């Protein structure tokens, strides 16, 4: 294999590594920038609420979320640093290989120069050819001298190309080291901020002991509101399931009557031959071709559904959460801190099933076949029951909390009569 092919192979391998690195690095950088935006948005929100001396449940959740986002950012930076360290090692190895090849090329070129020097005059070349044993050997020696000159030029070109490749890799190595230094500095700064925020969190938790009665009252109020909402959602969905079962049973009875008329049997006799099969709630909700297709389309978009608001930070996730000392809350969806009066949009095609108004807190339930999406804490609705909506269509605006001046939208996704975690369904 020629030195050119060896050099090109090394460079091609290096470029492939760079491509993989660039892709992963770009993804991590994008993730870090997203976390920066969420942290900044949450900081602005906390500045608004920090002027209020009394602590709120939302403020405690926001502080916890802020720490979680900081930890995620440090984890992302660590991943970036690991990638850069691998890149630096790859740069060093490539430079070492190229320098080794350069040394071989130079030695080979020196040998060629020495041979050319010894045979620089025409007489020596002619003697070299005429010393051949026969015509074939003489012909081969003529071709050898011609190829020797071409090879010498190739070696000179290879040396120049390799030197340029080394210079390029050295420059890239220095750039990687600079990027590494910047990330390490950012990592250290984030650790300092986390230490400060952990101190603030400790003070908040200590303050809760002095406002425990007020805090528990607020928590109890929120739990009651959440329970009322959950009951209302379950009731609406169960009514839909019951209605679908009723329609399905009517269709079955009509089919049995037709079959009885055709065969001359009684309906009971026909029914005994074709007993009803009890379907699950989700099967009942997707019992038509249109509903089944809509359900399948919704499911296939898991991880790609748009957010209900253009900008927002998840301040509390799905499931059970501990806030303070021994205080546990259950969340059937996710809470998203967003801008005041921000438009709230549908996450998928569907039909508005229910519009609830609980003391000015609007909740909208949209059906997507066997799935339901629920949007809560809206100030005013812009859709009505039975209306068909498209993804991104505005359903209303985020309600502004009169107590702290912030807006937080609550999103739930239900599969049949069971709530599921919405976060994995939303686009990253």
Image (tube, rainbow, N blue to C red):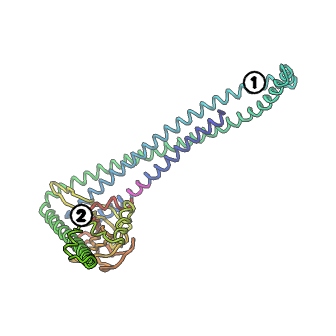
Q: Secondary structure at mark 2?
A: strand
Q: Secondary structure at mark 1?
A: helix
For the C terminus, the quadrant is bottom left
Residue at the disc numbered 1:
114
Q: Is residue 33 magenta?
A: yes
Give the camera-side residue of 123 and 168.
123
Q: Is residue 229 left or right of residue 23?
A: left
Give the camera-side residue of 347 and 152.
347
The reply to whether residue 382 is visible in this rendering is no
Q: Residue furthest left?
A: 213
Q: Main secondary structure of the magenta part?
A: helix
Question: Disc 2, disc 1: CB below 8 Å?
Answer: no
Residue 368 locus on image (x, y percent): 33, 70
Q: Residues within 10 Å of mark 2 (few under 14, many from 20)?
A: some
Residue at the disc numbered 2:
418
Q: Is residue 228 left or right of residue 173?
A: left
CA gap, disc 2 and disc 1: 85 Å
Which residue occupies 56% across, 33% down? 96
The segment highlighted magenta reads 30-35
Foreground label between 2 and 1: 2
Which residue occupies 54% across, 44% down? 16
Residue 58 locus on image (x, y percent): 24, 63
- Seen in the picture, residue 386 relative to 225 is either above or below; the reply is below
Give the camera-side residue of 180 and 129.
129
Residue 36 locus on image (x, y percent): 38, 57
């Amino acid at each position: 294999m020629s030195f050119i092919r060896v050099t090109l192979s090394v460079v091609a391998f290096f470029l492939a590594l760079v491509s993989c690195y660039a892709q992963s690095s770009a993804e991590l950088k994008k993730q870090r920038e997203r976390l920066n935006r969420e942290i900044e948005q949450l900081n602005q929100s906390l500045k608004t609420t920090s002027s209020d001396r009394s602590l709120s449940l939302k403020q405690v959740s926001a502080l916890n979320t802020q720490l979680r986002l900081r930890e995620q950012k440090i984890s992302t930076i660590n991943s970036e640093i690991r990638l850069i360290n691998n890149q630096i090692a790859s740069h060093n190895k490539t430079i070492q290989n190229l320098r080794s090849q350069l040394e071989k090329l130079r030695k080979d070129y020196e040998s060629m120069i020495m041979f050319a020097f010894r045979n620089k005059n025409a007489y020596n070349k002619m003697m070299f050819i005429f010393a051949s044993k026969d015509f074939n050997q003489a012909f081969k020696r003529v071709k050898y001298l011609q190829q020797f000159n071409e090879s010498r030029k190739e070696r000179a070109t290879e040396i120049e190309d390799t030197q340029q490749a080394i210079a390029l890799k050295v420059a890239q190595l220095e750039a990687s080291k600079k990027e590494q230094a910047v990330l390490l500095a950012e990592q250290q700064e984030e650790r300092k901020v986390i230490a400060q925020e952990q101190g603030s969190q400790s003070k908040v938790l200590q303050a809760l002991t002095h406002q425990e009665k007020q805090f528990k009252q607020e928590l109890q109020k929120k739990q009651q509101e959440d329970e009322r909402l959950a009951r209302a959602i379950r009731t609406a969905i169960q009514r839909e399931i019951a209605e679908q079962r009723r329609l399905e049973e009517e269709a079955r009875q009509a089919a049995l009557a037709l079959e009885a008329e055709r065969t001359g049997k009684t309906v009971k006799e026909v029914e005994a031959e074709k007993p009803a099969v009890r379907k699950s709630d989700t099967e009942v909700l997707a019992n038509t071709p249109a509903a089944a297709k809509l359900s399948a389309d919704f499911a296939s978009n898991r991880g790609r559904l748009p957010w209900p608001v253009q900008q927002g930070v998840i301040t509390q996730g799905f499931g059970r959460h501990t806030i303070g000392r021994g205080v546990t809350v259950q969340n059937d969806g996710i809470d998203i801190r967003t801008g005041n009066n921000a438009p709230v949009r549908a996450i998928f095609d569907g039909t508005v099933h229910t519009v609830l108004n609980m003391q000015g807190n609007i909740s909208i339930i949209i059906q997507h076949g066997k799935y339901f999406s629920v949007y809560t804490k809206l100030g005013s609705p812009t859709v009505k029951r039975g209306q068909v909506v498209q993804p991104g269509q505005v359903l209303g605006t985020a309600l502004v909390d009169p107590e702290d001046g912030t807006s937080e939208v609550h999103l739930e996704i239900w599969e049949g009569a069971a709530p599921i975690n919405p976060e994995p369904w939303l686009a990253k």
